[in-house]
Amino acid sequence: MRTLYFLLPGTSSQFTCGGLFAELKTLALAQQICEAAVVTYQQREANTLFLDDLLQTEAAQQGIFVVSWGFHVPKLVKRLRQQAVVYHAHSAGYGFRLPSSVPILAVSRNTMGYWGQWCPSAPIFLVPNQISPEFSDRGLPRDIDVLVQVRKSSQYLLTQLVPALQQHCNVVLIDRFVDDLAGLFNRSKVYLYDTAEYWAQYSVTEGFGLPPMEAMACGCQVFSSVNGALADYLDPGFNCQAIGVYSTAYDTQRILAALQTQTPPSLSSDFLEPYQEVKIVPRLRHILTEINAFFDHTEQYKSDILPLSSKRINQLRLQKLWKKVMTKMSRDRS
């Protein structure tokens, strides 16, 4: 198989986010299948390949470049038009389209559906994000009633719901990076997650939503928004509860009731399996085999399928309108 080069702006603390960690986890999984390495393109880092340097070598022509960093993707794809490129799609809604020569690895069905509509001629595959083994119920005493991560949380959650809950229970807000998030989840009874407002501001979607799944895996009761890819696995009323529903009082009432019952999330025995290494690696191996075969094909054949561009869509609409006009004229004559 071709070597995979995972492109990241950098890996230092200034780039720390869920997307970075998810990408590095995928890199580690890919390294079980083929040669794979991180390549930075904004910040030079010790013992790490840098894109400008790599493109000057023969290895660049023999590898596959994996791009993933949202708003950077169009420029990177344009810059790498002479190389084999794969888009690892974490989110949807960015507004750009990709040529059919760029396979898409979607981390969720929600994201896969979006790119299946926008780039239907590109090879598209589903590669779920990984839930690390440390996210499991350790059976520890739960001294935190309600856990909230400030980043990405809605104003409603932070300014209305949290103050209301603080009058009745122990609410812990996390506004910094935590080394042992699994440990915090294991100490918490309820986890609140509300990101619809956050993603709407950027006009993109929740690409996967790892925290609620990780919290559920640790035995937390989860109250969450169900925007974007969260709808892939959250089932309000069964394995979670929806948040931001109707009124602060209604949310508060349901959360306090959950604290009283302390019922762990209702998860089927195979709920987490698709997101575990043992399932992802064989799937990724199969997908990478297909992608390598696809790039073998593109070296010999050119694409002859029209892209679903804005211009093409307008043409199709005009053709449909013209057909209706001609049909009506034909009926009027008869």
Image (cartoon, rainbow, N blue to C red):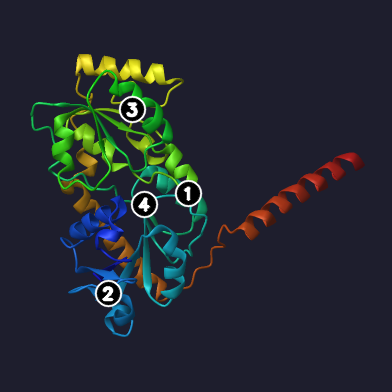
Q: Quadrant of residue 312?
A: bottom right
Q: CA distance from mark 1 to mark 4?
A: 14 Å
Residue type pointed to by label 1 = Tyr
The residue tagged 1 is 202
The mark nearer the N terminus, 1 or 2, is 2
Q: Position of residue 145 (x, y in %)?
A: 21, 25
SS of the residue at dot 3? Answer: helix
Q: Label 4: how many residues lie within 10 Å, few (<14), some (14-19) or many (20+)?
A: many
Q: Nearer the viewer, residue 293 or 129?
A: 129
The residue tagged 4 is 90
Q: CA distance from mark 4 to mark 3?
A: 29 Å
The mark nearer the N terminus, 2 or 3, is 2
Q: Nearer the viewer, mark 4 or mark 3?
A: 3
Q: Label 2: how many residues lie within 10 Å, few (<14), some (14-19) or many (20+)?
A: some
Q: Position of residue 224 (x, y in %)?
A: 34, 31
Q: Nearer the viewer, mark 1 or mark 3?
A: 3
Q: Position of residue 47 (x, y in %)?
A: 17, 74
SS of the residue at dot 2? Answer: loop
Q: Quadrant of the N terminus?
A: bottom left
SS of the residue at dot 4? Answer: loop
**Which residue shows up at 25% across the image and 54% down it?**
21
Residue type pointed to by label 4 = His
The residue tagged 2 is 44
Q: CA distance from mark 1 to mark 2?
A: 28 Å
**Which residue shows up at 48% across the image and 65% down it?**
99
